[in-house]
Image: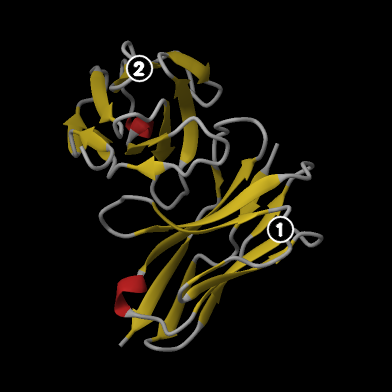
């Protein structure tokens, strides 16, 4: 079974600074997808960024980028120029590829606080 | 609607009662998922529908939990004989039937069993 581990229950960062959230996962599959979701107090899970395992290039979405290390099974999220609106719970998630609409497996989350 | 709609937003019930939670997915999305998120945890998979049929119900914790999607659109998660341990946020998501089509989540229903 696949597992996703987020070892940082809480993180804080000064506004405009950069922060990195960690995620490791365990799988025997060679092809899969990785995601970072943001969950504000509204409870809705919002997709931040995703990475296909077969792609060596790290995904980037504006201020958000990932460091994907396939051999180490590590998938960290870097948030640059942190903004107050970035404050939320962040969840790392895994999904097998090539199995149609496979379910997501989530980590336990990291609560990110932005210090003004 | 523009997004996934879940009703009610909050539900308080007494131990032993029956509850129904509703999910209205994005129009045209054939895949629908239910997740349960306990306090301080990440969402845990419950069940996945492809059209009207449950393609994977391996996450349902016991036979008190049941979900239906009779017309391939709206889904209802049903919990019988509720227990205090059922208290959680129940999230619904939908997607297109394409490999790695992104999941769109609703705002969830917070269920409190007293």
| Label 1: chain letter | A
Q: Position of residue A91 (x, y in %)?
A: 49, 56
Height in image: A105 above or below A54? above
Q: Give the total number of marks visible in the rendering.
A: 2
Identify the residue at horizontal 42%, vertical 53% (top origin): B40
Residue A5 lies in quadrant: bottom right
* Eye-nearest disc, 1 or 2: 1
Q: Quadrant of the C terminus of chain A?
A: bottom left
Q: Residues within 10 Å of mark 1 (few under 14, many from 20)?
A: few
Q: Which mark is residue A55?
A: 1
Height in image: B23 above or below A88? above
**How far apart in space, not on screen, are marks 1 and 2 (Cα)?**
34 Å
Q: Position of residue A80 (x, y in %)?
A: 48, 81
B6 left or right of A69? left
Residue B20 lies in quadrant: top left
| Label 2: chain letter | B
Q: Which residue is mark 2?
A: B72
Q: Residues within 10 Å of mark 2 (few under 14, many from 20)?
A: some
Q: Position of residue A6 (x, y in %)?
A: 58, 60
Identify the residue at horizontal 44%, vertical 33% (top origin): B96
| Residue B114 visible in the current orientation | no
Identify the residue at horizontal 31%, vertical 18% (top origin): B78
């Amino acid at each position: 079974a696949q597992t996703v581990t987020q070892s940082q229950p809480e993180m804080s960062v000064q506004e405009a600074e950069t922060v990195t959230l960690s995620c490791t996962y365990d799988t025997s599959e060679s092809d899969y997808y990785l995601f970072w979701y943001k969950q504000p107090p509204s409870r809705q899970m919002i997709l931040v960024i995703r990475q296909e395992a077969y792609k060596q290039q790290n995904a980037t979405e504006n201020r958000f980028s990932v460091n994907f290390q396939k051999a180490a099974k590590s998938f960290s999220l870097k948030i640059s120029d942190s903004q107050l609106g970035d404050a939320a719970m962040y969840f790392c998630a895994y999904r097998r590829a090539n199995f149609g609409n496979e379910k997501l497996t989530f980590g336990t989350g990291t609560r990110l606080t932005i210090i003004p | 609607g523009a997004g996934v709609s879940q009703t009610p937003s909050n539900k308080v019930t007494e131990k032993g009662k029956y509850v129904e939670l509703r999910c209205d997915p994005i129009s045209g999305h054939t895949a629908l998922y239910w997740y349960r998120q306990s306090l301080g945890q990440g969402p845990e998979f419950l069940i996945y529908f492809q059209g009207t049929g449950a393609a994977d119900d391996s996450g349902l914790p016991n036979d008190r939990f049941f979900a239906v999607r009779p017309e391939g659109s709206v889904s209802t998660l049903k919990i019988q004989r509720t227990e205090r341990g059922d208290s959680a946020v129940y999230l619904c998501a939908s997607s297109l039937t394409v490999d790695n089509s992104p999941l769109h989540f609703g705002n969830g229903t917070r269920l409190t069993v007293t």
